[in-house]
Amino acid sequence: MSLAVGRYQPLTREGSWADVDDGGRLSGRLALAHQPRFDKTPHDGAGNLNRTSMSLVFAYYCSGHGYGHATRVSALAQHLLDLDASLKPAVYIVSSAPKHVFVDSIAKGAIYRNATIDPVIVQPLAYRVDRERSVSTLRTFLDARERILEAETRWLRDIGATCVLSDAAFIGCLAATDVGIPSILVTNFTFDSVYSYLATSIVDTPTEESHESQHHYHALVPDTPIPLEELAPLVEQIHAGYRCADMLLRLPGHIPIPSFFVQPALPSPDWVDPLTNRFRSNVFSALEESATDLPLLGSIPYAQAHCKTKPARSAIPIPLLVRPTSAEIYTPAGRAKLLASIGVPAALHDPRKTKILVVSFGGQVFRRPSRSGSATPSPSHSRRTSRELRREDLNPGVDVLASQLSSRLSVEVKRPHVHVGPRLQVPGHETESSGNPIATPSHLWIPGAPPAAKSLTSPTSPLRASASLSFQTIPGPSEATDADEQFFDTEDDDYGPSLLPDDSWIAIVCGVSKEQWNSTQTDAGADSELPDPFYIAPRDVYMPDLTAVGDVLLGKLGYGTVSECLDSATPFVYVSRPLFIEEHGLRRLLSSQGVGVELSRARYEAGDWAGAIDEAYIQGRAGKEQKRAMGVGSAVQRAEEGREMAEMIVGWAEKWQNT
């Protein structure tokens, strides 16, 4: 008997899903391409699964490294929990990311457990990597691997787990093999490639603007490649964990997955031409080939104590995993509700008259646009404070996890005058304040971004060394994130026009809580308010909806932001992170499926955004208008794709359990 589950069918050497492309789009219903390798699950005459008496329990491991992992884990968990009662599995989510980022999944029945399940890449800035400290963090985690693995295998047995999903924590795949259950890797990249890339000869050179800030006592640690011979034994332990996975659900924006495919193999620096900082031609060729033409590495067997045989390894391209927009966001009423909740006056709600830039990337010092005599006059309306979205207004989604994992260091725009922001402790100098204000008459701090600071030394003088510098690691996801800052500078009124293209634009900046904003309103005075074109979104704003109302988004190149921009046809202006090898896959996805315009770090730090914003808007305008006209129609397609994906996963796990 042959079986097919929805549109999905494993990519093995025997068969392929021709109508699932690398962009994650589906077309047509698939016919069977090969016979299953293990026991069959009964179907009715219509090809639907017949539920047996047993119950499936999925343990979903989510990396605590960033926003994208949390958003797509939440999306897939919801698809699983939205299945009919006869199919719906129990879903446990385990992560070092805080519980609230999975609120939507938990509301549908997911059970959350906090645990340290993977190391992190240490970032002194949102777009920089500290290689030495990243390797040190990895060593610490691997030294504790056996203890962590023992705890995870015990927990999997305690909950009666029947299958592990992982994005993309290798420890979950290892634990599944120890317990004797299958595991599924759901990702567009794996961390063996990321850590291996710390050996790249490409050096992340700071910009001129970066040199002028004292926080770079911390941030400008020399970017020195890690020797391959030092990295190799560490990376091999990560790689071996991923080798235990039985199925790869490969997301759009993927790079090579060396634990599944024979080629391209590690080390990952070999994949990139250091002169161009782009994948080499053989790597691009491998990414463009059908997975049926790429040999798969073999399975890692269970221990002899387990009587079951592992399923044959398979790799499946799947559509974007992305949180859906609210049903009403493409209606005038829904758009108005969201913008009003942010404090945008009703006169600026019409998309035909007002264009919106969403700033979802901390670390920038913004110069206050001129209130008079500027080429970009401010709209003459009163300011309103930002307030949090109520649950009855809009369904709150995942907080921006990236802000919780970001460094507490800053980026500085060049200016020679003296000012030191809070939290920067430079020997021999006092900080401006020991408190944590959100604003002063000259500055507005935006939590969630690295803190900004002005240099006390001459802009042309070298930074002085200090023997007593203290380095802050990336705050753990369970820690409070109360004092990450960035600010507006009120000086130099003629600087404003470079931020936004013209006076038809407003900007909505993510990262300020209601409490931090309101606590300063009675203390800081009128000058503490944002300049008229800028508004602050609540910290719990539902980002898919905010991205949907935006005409352009400015941020860093990560899966979560890219997927939400693609889903809403929002043009994306991004600042590159040269030591994140995942970017190569995401850039390739943007070029084929959306609009992406790269903004150099120097222009980003200088606040010279307008040209890139205008370029992205022009390139993506037609697609954005078409998306708005379509409304939630594409969301229905996403939901159908998600349902079929969830049914496929359940069917695959049941077939193994019935063996």
Image (cartoon, rainbow, N blue to C red):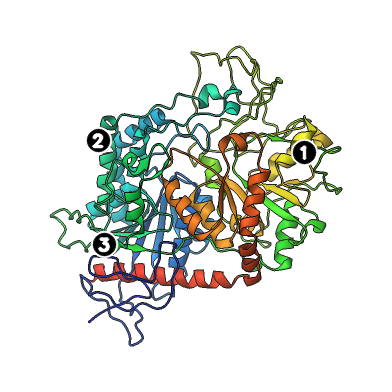
Q: Identify the residue at horizontal 51%, vertical 27% (top origin).
A: 219
The residue tagged 1 is 369
In this rendering, position of residue 419 left or right of residue 584 = right
Q: Position of residue 425 (x, y in %)?
A: 59, 20
Tell which residue pokes out farthest to the bottom in this image: 45
Mark 1, other Cα within 10 Å: few <14 / some 14–19 / many ≥20: many
Q: Earlier in the sequence, mark 2 or mark 1?
A: 2
Q: Is residue 547 visible?
A: no
Q: Is residue 326 above or below residue 273?
A: below
Q: Identify the residue at horizontal 15%, vertical 61% (top origin).
A: 307
CA–CA distance in space, label 3 to label 1: 55 Å
Under circle 2, the secondary element is helix
Mark 2, other Cα within 10 Å: few <14 / some 14–19 / many ≥20: few
Residue closest to the eye, 368 or 63:
368
Q: Is residue 56 above or below residue 467?
A: below
Could you tell me the amino acid type at mark 1? Pro
CA–CA distance in space, label 2 to label 3: 30 Å
Under circle 1, the secondary element is loop
In this rendering, position of residue 490 left or right of residue 513 = right
The residue tagged 3 is 293
Residue closest to the eye, 177 or 22:
22
Q: Which mark is residue 233?
A: 2
Under circle 3, the secondary element is helix
